[in-house]
Amino acid sequence: MSALTALPAGIAGPLPAPAPGWAIEADVVVVGSGVAGLTAALRCAAAGRRTVIVTKARLDDGSTRWAQGGIAAALGEGDSPEQHLADTLVAGAGVCDERAVRTLVTEGPAAVRRLIALGATFDTAPDGGLSLTREGGHHRRRIAHAGGDATGAEISRALVAAVRSAGIETVENALALDLLKDVNGRAAGVTLHVMGEGRHDGVGAVRAPAVVLATGGMGQVYSSTTNPAVATGDGVALALRAGAEVSDLEFVQFHPTPLFLGPQAEGQQPLISEAVRGEGAHLVDAAGVRFMLGAHELAELAPRDIVAKAITRRMAEQGTDHMFLDARHFGAAMWQRRFPTILATCRSHGIDPVTEPIPVAPAAHHASGGVRTDLAGRTTVPGLYACGETACTGVHGANRLASNSLLEGLVFAERIAEAVVADAPAAGEPVLPSPATGGPGLLPPEARLTIQRLMTAGAGVLRSAASLAGAAAALDALTCDDDRKPAEPGADTWETANLRLVARVLVSVAQSRTETRGCHWREDHPERNDARGRCHQIAALRASADGHQLAVHTTESTAFPDGPVVP
Ligand code: SIN
């Protein structure tokens, strides 16, 4: 099945930006500095490749630092990659690529041990082994954690230290704009804009024949998300503009239990880790009723989509905007030892989990889809690679299993480094984007809020043909030009353009998936349709006479086994 949708003018072309005023030469440029980006950079540098990391804020400012619960791997007594595979496939609701999952779960344990050898310190049990916890969808204790509930921060600390001691060149506060290509359509670097002071300033370029996208997620497409402000879908938008294929974008995971800060709360919301439920916290309504009992055999530890849906349903039934997570029975000492970050965060918002239930409500958390890659991180554009949340390896299917994402970032970043070294991509002279100082395509920065609200209302936890059609029409109607006050190129307007593009593609593929599966919940198609639904929706932009079209086709496998497809 394939379909073409005409997109409004200006939504999909290269970002209007001045011509690069400076350039760095490298063998590999890694865009992003979470677990995936830093791991890929370390591996490429260790293989002798001149590597440059470009990151939007500081080296340790990505999503990884916010990960609380941990990293899943079959490391415990009696556990096995086969069992981890089984749990991942169940959570993925029939859409995982089994080869990708098998790669993840078999290579995962050794990758975690290498991370420990590199300097990451995980919590240990009294016998000196790793302390492992459970999260939703896992039938075993297999989540390794650090600092109680500060796993991502510890992984980030260790990797940043390793990158610094390896002397890898980094360009911080830099928003990657567009892919540079040579005349043959191969990746040849990126253009970027450095904000603030530093050795480089303004728009420049990193010229490199291998470009690794590891920019994290796109949670900021919604009003409320657990993702940091930098998660604006930049890598997916850049890849789309470069002609790469994306896959599974309709599958956005909503975390069931971010802290509820009130109906007006927008932007990044504090996470209450699933590990809190893993250690025995209960989900209750305002009357104290445990509504997950009887809803699923794993109750509060059902896969995340099931818990998020149960909460959303209960809220609708009771006409309220939040439920509660009750972990008073942990007692003060356990809260302090096991979840010090969450305890401090709750208290800073006036809630004491030791004495009262925590108000919670679902928020956008993780993009299960992204830039389509093979098992070595190659995208459909030669020389362009993607890993971590930016990529769609096929591991997550319709719903990511908890704590599989740090592992995915590690395992597939290591594989990308091997592929970059093996492929030894070569690029000709980049064809520089023509200098432009504005023009169509940019929305005023205020449009960001509009996009987030449209997406939350139309393409959030619960979707329907009408809500999606409304979101699509409203996104298309956002006007680029105000003659009195044209939107100027700049970080805000470029990010807003990225948000709009990924939002628009997400809405299109959510429209054409007329079933309910994993974290894609269609009110008007409440059943899973296994005859048609076990497929991936692959989307790509195509230039047309009057602008751009979005081409969507379906396929059985996210992977393209024969290597990159030349566009
Ligand atoms: C959490 O700690 O609940 C988040 C873990 C994850 O998203 O994998």
Image: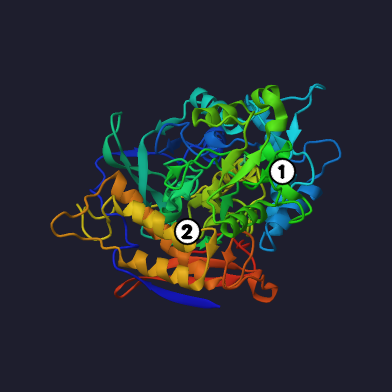
Mark 2, residue position: 381
Q: Is mark 2 within 8 Å of ligand 1?
A: no
Secondary element at tag 2 = loop
Q: How is the image coloured?
A: rainbow
Give percent across and percent down for residue 290.
71, 48
Asked whether residue 430 appears in the rendered view, the answer is no
Secondary element at tag 1 = helix
Q: Is residue 68 left or right of residue 204?
A: right
Specify the quadrant of the image occupied by residue 525: bottom right
Q: Tell us which disc is closer to us: 2 or 1.
A: 1
- How crowded pointer 1 is (Cα within 10 Å; few <14, some 14-19, many 20+) is rated as some
Q: Quadrant of ligand 1?
A: top right
Give percent across and percent down for residue 388.
56, 46
Is residue 260 or residue 368 the one in the foreground? 260
- Above or below residue 42? Residue 209 is below
- How crowded pointer 2 is (Cα within 10 Å; few <14, some 14-19, many 20+) is rated as many
Is residue 240 or residue 329 the one in the foreground? 329
Mark 1, residue position: 107
